[in-house]
Image (cartoon, rainbow, N blue to C red):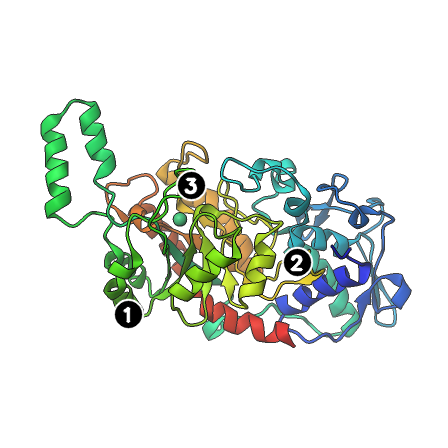
Amino acid sequence: MPATTAESRLHYVLQHFWQAYDAVPTVSIGYADTQPQVEVVAVEHNFFAGTAPYPAPPLWREWQGRQLPFFFDAQPARPLLVLLPEGRARVQADVVSAAFYLLSGWQEFYSDERDQHGRFPYAASVQQRYGFVAVPVVNYYFEVLRAAVEHAGGQPLRPRRWADGRAWAAFITHDIDNLYSAWKAPAKAALQRRDWLGFARRYWQHFTQKDAWDNLAEVQQTVAEYGAKSTFFFLPEHRKAPNGTTNADYQVKQILPVIATLKQHGAEVALHGSLGTSLDPDRLYDEVVSFDSAGWGLRFHYLHWEPRVTPDLVDNLTNGYDSTLGFAEHYGFRNSYCLPFNLFNFQLGEAADFLEIPLNVMDATLHHPKYLQLAPEEILPALTPMFQEIERFGGVCTVLWHNENFDPANTRNGPREFRALMEYLRSRNVAFVNGSDICRSFQPSLSS
Ligand SMILES: [Zn+2]
């Protein structure tokens, strides 16, 4: 595996920095050896030559009124930013190493921790350990660089803008796992109560009425009420995984007319990779080709993602986008960044080609026996600080709300709670975009 060099890490971080401000590089940024206008002070550490998942604990500094963790910061007594004469500046914490560490996904690549579904657990993350999951720390590091660059270049750097000049964007998505299973839980509960009549009624309804989760037109209609459009991720695998975990309860080829209608009404349709495809390039390829969608997007079922395999596998297959990377256990920023970005391909030692649109909040995270147990009225107040961070940095807020949770019977993380989020987003003048819009706005500048 190619080791990273200080140069490759700097290049990776600066690529994202300039992209965050939609700016062409006008000021040189680097370590002292290249005598740049903005010097980032190198801290003696050999961290990236090794394979340890975690660096030394961060030091906390105040920046723009916020306490922020700085990894690779040796001398907290020194001011963070020194503005020098003749268009020079010095950043006295190694924000390039710190940004590389978080953005690249280093911790999950080198950690051996995985949960029962094979995922890197939130509990093993530095975000959990130091309590900054809902703070896009890398965006704050970039603000330090921005202040230095503005001083050095004598010009303001402005955050990028979205459609109609809006300051930030929202990417509303639905993973379609189930269409026909709403009746099962209540029928089972009736059986357990020995409520035979209740069971019989559910069973009869199942055969004679539309299932409450067979609701994709209603989902689209609900989203449209907010002037928004959304993206539907369909799961082309009907069979269970070898360990018994379920994939779709429907067969894609039987619902092609439904999908066509969604598309006609402006929906984006993308691939929900079934269990195992995040580890198996042939199976993922089969699902991609079986599923014709122009310029494609991807999210893996169960948010399954093996950091040592999946990035390279997706990188080989597409320059489209993925939107798997959030923590199932907690809303926030898994890579501490609120803009779409390119993961680091550790096999190649450079940025991956596909765009990662990080997932910020999933419906199940908010109320689930193993995740959070927020009351309905607690949801929006809990999420608002995260939304404010995304708005501040002109980022993308990615929301996953399963079609199952548009069932009015769900009064915990159901349609009412979804509507409350949409009301908020609309009230903050967000641009509702889909994955293709985001790719169009982000990928061209990266390929240059
Ligand atoms: Zn799924």
Q: Is residue 93 above or below residue 430?
A: above
Q: Helix or strand or loop: what does disc 3 sit on?
A: loop
- Residue positioned 72% across, 58% down in the render: 144
Q: Is label 3 within 8 A of ligand 1 (CB to nearest ligand atom)?
A: no
Under mark 1, the amino acid is: His
Which percent across, then down, holds residue 437? Answer: 46, 70
Residue at (75, 44) in percent of width and height: 51
Label 3 neighbourhood size at 10 Å, few (<14), some (14-19), many (20+)? few
Which numbered disc, 2 or 1, marks the residue that appears first in the sequence?
A: 1
Counting other residues with Cα less than 10 Å from the Cα at mark 1, is it few (<14), some (14-19), or many (20 or more)? few
Which sits earlier in the primary sequence, circle 1 or circle 3?
3
Q: Which mark is residue 344?
A: 2
Near-viewer residue (100 or 166) = 100
- From the viewer's perspective, is the residue at label 3 or at label 2 nearer? 3
Q: Amino acid at mark 3?
A: Pro
1 vs 3, front mark: 3
Q: Mark 2 vs mark 1: give the one in front.
A: 2
92 to the left or right of 330: right
Q: Is residue 42 above or below residue 319?
A: above
Q: Split into 4 quadrants, where in the image is the N terminus?
A: bottom right
What residue sits 28% from the left and 56% below the top? 219
Q: Position of residue 162 (x, y in %)?
A: 50, 70
Looking at the rendered structure, which numbered label has been put on residue 167?
none
Element class at badge 2: strand
Q: Residues within 10 Å of mark 2 (few under 14, many from 20)?
A: many
What's the amino acid at mark 2?
Answer: Phe
Quarter of the rendering occupied by the C terminus: bottom right
**Contact (Cβ within 8 Å) of mark 2 with mark 1:** no
Q: Label 1: which residue?
A: 265
Q: Which residue is mark 3?
A: 242
Q: Is residue 247 left or right of residue 99?
A: left
